[in-house]
Structures are given as structure tokens and as C-alpha cells.
Image (spheres, rainbow, N blue to C red):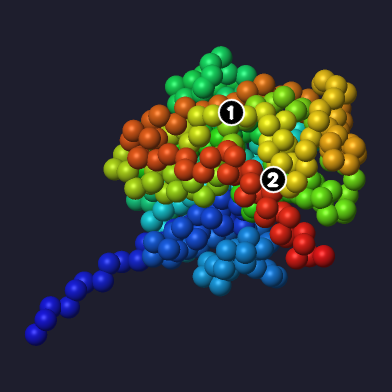
Amino acid sequence: MAKRLARRPVRRALITGVAGQDGAYLARLLLRRGYEVWGTTRLPRGPAPWRLEALGIAGRVRLLPLDLADAGRIEALVDEVRPHEVYNLAGLSQVSRSFAEPVETGNVDALGVSRLLEAVRRRAPEARYYQASSSEMYGRAGEIPQRESTAFHPVSPYGVAKLYAHWITVTYRDAYGLHASSGILFNHESPLRGPEFVTRKITDGLARIRLGLAETLELGNLTARRDWGYAEDHVLGMWMMLQQERADDYVLATGRAHSVRDFVDLAAGALGFDLAWEGEGTAARALDRRSGRTVVQVSPRLYRPLDIDEVRGDPGKARRQLGWQAEVKFETLVEILAQADLRRLKQAA
């Protein structure tokens, strides 16, 4: 009689902030690898989060309510799920909003991480923990590119809160022996990115102008340079970190930086515009050579109180130790976003 093969136990993953861009892509990645996925949102009742619907996984993720300000609920949830892996992606993720809501940003993005780590330490100490750190922690760092050893100098309430979260994760790893890793992710985009972020604001705005639904796109600082990658590449790196024998911190980036204006030029080209720029700084504007219309203009009110000239990461450690690298190039990324917004708006018409 043939021996019956032992079934491999199903791994359980808990993703806070599963309704966000990264949470949705990560949930799909884990489901494809056979995980049982639990995800938290602030509002789990009602229709399934649209990003999970868009990826076709809404019915496969077990949704639970969670507020990172509620320590008792966090501990009860970890005790209920008993996860093998915890990915903390929840929080307020918009830098500009953090200037308007600095206290709430600190309570959620900083102290919320302490509450979650303490719950994991008390209720699931064998779980592997991932913390979503951010390139915003570097701020006005003294070197480019930024790597794991670069000194942090955040210039926004969001960056400050993320820095606290990063160091408390390191402390729980060193002091309590948790398998806790931080991914210092540089900007990463996709069609699931919210329209409040500049990349989607650009592609959505230009697509609307292309279809006659809007006249002009207003932007802030065009010279800011960012290291833009593709979200699906980056969430793969998150998973790879938790498969390592030892926990550590890793920069995930493309190693290349481009300006906001570069992004505008590529997106405009993908949507059939031929831009000609006039003026500098707050007087800059872009005209479409074909129609003569002003397509893009700069608005001083959209500048941040403090901004960073250039953010560019060095992914060398992730490449050497994880075997990770960004696959989708900047030009392809912009094309993906522009065409996705054009399709979406056509379908909605």
C-alpha cells in the first residue's frame, strides 16, 4: 500500500492595510504561493476593497477590522489569527497629508507599529514580521544614492513617524529576538496607486485632457527627482525578506532617479501629446505643439512646506543577499500607468 504523503501545513499571513496598493498585490502573491491570507482594513464592512476586486481575489482574503490606535484589538486579532508571517503595511501614507495631520500620523505610523510589535511578541513570537519603512526617512540625507547605512534626516511628519517605526522594529529584533525585518522602499507605483499621489495625478490628469474631460493639469515642484519602481516588483522583495534565515533591513529601489517633469514628458508622449515647455520654477508650463493648448502648469500652492531634491536608492544589498532586483523599467512603468488610466476613463464614459 502506497505511503500517504504528509500534507504541508498551510502558512497563514496577516497583512495590515490589505486594501492599499501594496497590500492587494502582496495578498495576490501570497495566495498564489498557497498561503491563507488574512487582511485588515479600517472599514471591512460593505463592498470588498476595490483593489482586491480589481485583482480578482476579494473573496479569498479574510477581512478583519483594525485600528492601529487600539492596542487591545491588535492583540486580540494576532491571538485569533496566529500568523506565521505579519506584514505591516497599514498607516497614513501620503506625505502632504502628514503636514496637515502630524499627530494622527505619529499615532498610527509610529506608535501603531509599537502596538503591533508588542502584540506579536506576546501572542505570536515565532511569527516573522515585515515593517514597511520608507525612503522618506532619508529626507535630506548627506549622500546619494541612499543605502542601509545612510544617516536618516527626515523632513516631514510622515518621514519622522516612519523613522520611529523603523527603529522600534530594529529594537524588537535585537532586544526580544523577533524575526523582524524592515524594507526601506523607494517610490513604487502601479495602476492601483491612489489618485492623490503625483504619479497617478499626472497619468489620470493627462488622460482626462486627452479625452476632453479636463483642460489643464496643475502640479507642484517639477524638479524633484525620485526613484520610481513598480509595486509588484517591490512586494516580491517584501516576501523574500521573510524567507531569509536571519532578519535584516533592505533598501528596495531601482537605483535610477527621474524628475517629475521626466514623468510628465513620458506620460504625455504615451497619451499622444507633444509637449513644449516654457518658463522656469513656478512660472513653468507645457503646451501641446499640436493644439497650442496649455496642458500642464505649475501652482505654488502645490509645493510642500519642505521638499527633497533627489531620492535615489542603492539596492545592492537586496540584490546580493535576496537575489532581488527591479524588473520593470521607468519608461515601461509610466506607459503602464498612462494606458491604464486611459482605458479606465474610456470604460467609465
Q: Camera-side residue: 319 or 262?
A: 262
Q: Where is residue 243 in the image (x, y as percent from the top left)?
A: 34, 48
Q: Is residue 154 above or below residue 118?
A: above
Q: Is mark 2 on a helix, strand or loop?
A: helix
> What residue is shown with label 1?
257
- Identify the mark at residue 270; answer none if there is no mark: 2
Q: How crowded is mark 1: few (under 14 residues within 10 Å), some or many (20 or more)?
A: many
The image quadrant that residue 63 belongs to is bottom right
The picture places residue 206, in percent across and down from the top left corner, at 79, 46
Residue under the image location 63 percent in, 23 percent down: 310
- The image quadrant that residue 66 belongs to is bottom right
Looking at the image, the residue that sits furthest to the top is 142
Q: Which residue is at the front of the view, 45 or 140? A: 140
Q: How far apart are marks 1 and 2 (CA)?
A: 20 Å
Disc 1 marks a residue whose amino acid type is Ala
Residue 342 screen position, x and y as percent: 73, 55
Instruction: Name the residue type under label 2.
Output: Ala
Which quadrant would residue 31 be assigned to in this image?
A: bottom left
Disc 1, disc 2: CB below 8 Å?
A: no
